[in-house]
Each structure stands twice: as C-alpha cells, then as structure tokens.
Amino acid sequence: MLAQKGTDVVKRGMAEMQKGGVIMDVVNAEQAKVAEQAGATAVMALERVPSDIRKAGGVARMADPAIVEQVQKAVTVPVMAKARIGHIVEARVLESMKVDYIDESEVLTPADDVYHIDKKAFTVPFVCGCRDLGEAARRIGEGAAMLRTKGEPGTGNIVEAVRHMRLVNSQVRKVVGMSPDEIMVYAKELGAPYDVLLQIKEAGRLPVVNFAAGGVATPSDAALMMELGADGVFVGSGIFKSENPAKFARAIVEATTYYQDYERIAELSKGLGTPMKGIDMSVLQPSERMQDRGI
Amino acid sequence: MAVKIGVLALQGAVSEHIKALKASGADAQAVKHSSELEDLDGLVLPGGESTTMRRLMDETGLYDSLRLFAENKPIFGTCAGLILMAKKIEGRNGPHLGLLDIDVRRNAFGRQVDSFEATLNIRHVGDNFDGVFIRAPYIKSVGSGVEVLATYDDHIVACRQGRFLTCAFHPELTGDTRLHRYFVGIVEENR
C-alpha cells in the first residue's frame, strides 16, 4: 500500500486530465477567478503576459511568489507557473510552493543558454515548448511530462504555432512508418534520443500530450489548433488583452471543445470586440524571436 | 449485441476511457451533444476539471439531458466525474448532477506534488489494482444505500449505489480494465 509520488504516470496523467481544455495566463487573483469561471482547466500565474514582456524588454524572470500564492488561494483548478530555461532554483522554489505544473519557458529570458533543467529529478511535472520533433524528444528525454508548441508568444499571430504543430505531427507520422534502422539515422538528424523515437513508433503517438501555444488570439484560432491535432490550448496575452476578457475566455473554452461546430463558433465569435492587435513575423528582429531560445 | 456506452467528451481523459471500454467488450463513443445520449445504454464521466465540464454543460443544455439520462441508465464517474455525481461537495454551494448519496472533498490529498500511485483492493473487482490518484478527491461519508468498494488510508475512494459507480482514481490510465469490465456488467444487467 506504499504510495509512490512523482511517477511518470502521475506526471503525464495530470496533463491527460487537461486535454480538450484551455490553460489561461493570469497576472493576479482577480483574473484567475475570471478564467476559472469561464471554464479554464488551469491557470498560468505570471507577472506579465507575453505581449507585455515583449514591450517591457529587459530580463523576464519567474513571477513574484506572492502573485503565485494569491492565485493558488483564489481558484481550485490547477495553478501552473513559469521558470526560466535552465533555472534549477526558480523551478525548485516553485516546486516548494506546490505549484501544480512548471512551464520551463522561452517566454522568460533563459538562465542557461546550453542546458535545460533535468526534469526527472523533480516531483512536480514540467511542460516545455517545441518547434519540431527533435526539440520535443529532447525535452521528453529530460523528463518533460507535457509539451506545447512554442509558436511566437505575445504576437497574437497563429502562424508559428500552426507551423510547429504541423511539423511535429508530420514527423511523428514519419517515425511511426520507419523501421528501427531508419529511426537511428533520423534520430541523428533530429538530435533526438533514439529510445524516445522508438517509444513514439510503438505507441503511434507522442508519449505525452501536446498543447498549442504562442499566438492564439481568437476562438477560431483555438479551434484551428484542435483541428490540426492539438490536445488543448494555452492562451497567453489573447484573453486579458481583449476588450471583454470574461466573454472572450468563455468563447475560447467553448470553441476548443466544439472545434468542429462551425455555426456555434460563428455565434460565440459575434461581438467579441477587438482581439489583441497582433504582430507580423517579418517585423520581428532575430533577437525578438522567443521561439529560438532553448532549442 | 454489445452494450453501447458513451464518454462525456467536454474535456478530459476521453480517449483513454473509450479504449478501456472497447477492451472490455462494449461499443464506446464520445458524447458532446444531448442528441448523442439517445441510443446509449450507459455513460462514463471522465477525469478532467469538474468546473470546466459543468460550465460547458450549462452552456449547451447537456446538464438537463444528463439528469434525465441518469433516471434509468448507469453512470460511471472517475475523479472529476465523481465530483459531478456527488450530492454534497465540501466548500461548494450545491451539487452538480447530484446522483450519488456521498459527501466529497476536492483535491483531498493535496496538490499535484502529492499525487500518487498506490495498490488497491477493490470489492467485487479484484486485488492489486494500480490506483492512480491525480489531485484526487475522496469520499468523506456515504449514505445508507451506498456500498463502499475500496478505501485508501482509511478514506473511501470507490463506491457503488445501484446503477451508479464511482472512483476517485484513474483506472483509464493504467491499462487494467477490471473496473471497466465491472461497469460494463452493470450496464448489461440494466439493459
């Protein structure tokens, strides 16, 4: 009857329970309550949403623990929080606060430009971003229990998330159709751990859930990502930068569940007001591209 | 003919339940609309977030349809599904579907870092069952018509009341289909 904590089943299972749901960025207790009432399956507590991080510049770090604590007290849904890539101590601090999931995130300024955190050493589960199967498999190899596309955070532009979701899924299909000797060479090309690719071949899918993130700005964007095979959706700046956050949040939740009910999506998209303005990729400088961090 | 069992697919671990039900000899399908309940013999309320599922039920009219369905059809709720079925939820004003005479505590074992696996013996189902508890609730007390099927650390974590079955853990994540087969049996008897 001895209980085992922090097993792969428990870490990955927690993300399975989020499937079909929307995880929303919040910066205080009030926003967390709006998100929960709208039907968010979890909230991500942070100091600034990605679009404000973009504007502010400078070094973006883990949120003030006081904000995380306020959010934890305000809601019963899981509370996630971001640590900088490679910042072992920020992650340990969040774990000590009993955050439900840690996002080792490129939205924050990386603390380590070579190594990610050894996530297997933690009891708390981690989610990480990926642009292709190489990144996805490396993060799984390090112990990530959940993945998300990187997209391009804080832009309100869905194009990068679409690119990343399509690429990962097509590469998964490719691995499933390969023989073990071909997978060894493909692992070399991708810089991916061979055993993770073998697991993918055996299961016919990634061993962890893969959400969409980085640029979801409308209910139709959320539905598009589900159509392309996302297990669920993270919405960062989109909700609380819109004119009517409560209504907007409800619409995104419903569009994610009913992503193929187009009449319903039309109905719930009516009169939502202006979504966040959005940024075209061509105007971003290389240094402004968050997705190129921590690969 | 195999019984037909739906899995409420508003959010949560839907595909895992469908797989487990199929492996247990039932026809299984996802349910997102009231109309899809019509020809079902039973229903699973999966793990996920109960507040999210409830909001979507209210939005779509599924709430009333589910209450009607429950009047004569078996339902099996796991984790969030247990909370949806309970008549009493600590810290919340009123129940969701209110089907089972049980009093529950949400996130009763703590936050995610306290989530765990433990071996359970389940009455009528079998011993050495891998119980996967994820931010799980437990049942504080049950009414007189409710049979307790499993406990962990002196807390009730599975029970049955007539055609209603529930557990605080996630059998759908383990590949062990004994509990699903038990539910399929309840559905077959009820048909």
Image: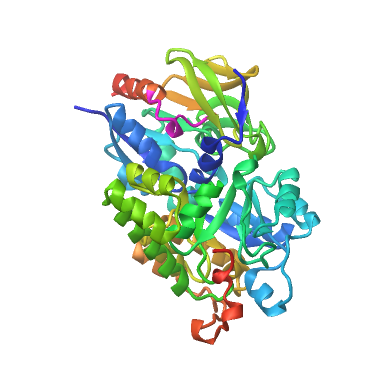
Left or right of B184, for residue A96? right
Place of residue A246 in the rendered image (x, y in percent of width and height, measured from the top left) = 60, 64
Instruction: Provide the major secondary structure of the magenta segment.
Output: loop
Residue ID at (66%, 65%) = A110
Q: How many marks?
A: 0
* Visible residue check, residue A279: yes
Q: Residue furthest right?
A: A66
Q: How is the image coloured?
A: rainbow
Residue ID at (41%, 32%) = B70
Decide: is A260 above or below B71: below
| Residue B175 covered by magenta stretch | yes
Q: Residue furthest bottom?
A: A283
**Which part of the image, by quadrant, shows the C terminus of chain A?**
bottom right
* Visible residue check, residue B41: no
Residue ID at (78%, 54%) = A65
- Along the line of sight, the residue nearer the viewer: A16 or A141: A141
Decide: is B19 above or below A76: above
- Along the line of sight, the residue nearer the viewer: A34 or B16: B16
Decide: is A172 above or below A280: above
Decide: is B43 above or below B182: below
| Residue A17 covered by magenta stretch | no
Left or right of A57, for residue A146? left
Place of residue B168 in the rendered image (x, y in percent of width and height, measured from the top left) = 54, 29
Place of residue A115 in the rendered image (x, y in percent of width and height, measured from the top left) = 62, 58
Place of residue A128 in the rendered image (x, y in percent of width and height, measured from the top left) = 56, 56
In magenta, the rendered stretch is B169-177
Left or right of B119, for residue A83? right
**Which part of the image, by quadrant, shows the N terminus of chain A?**
top right
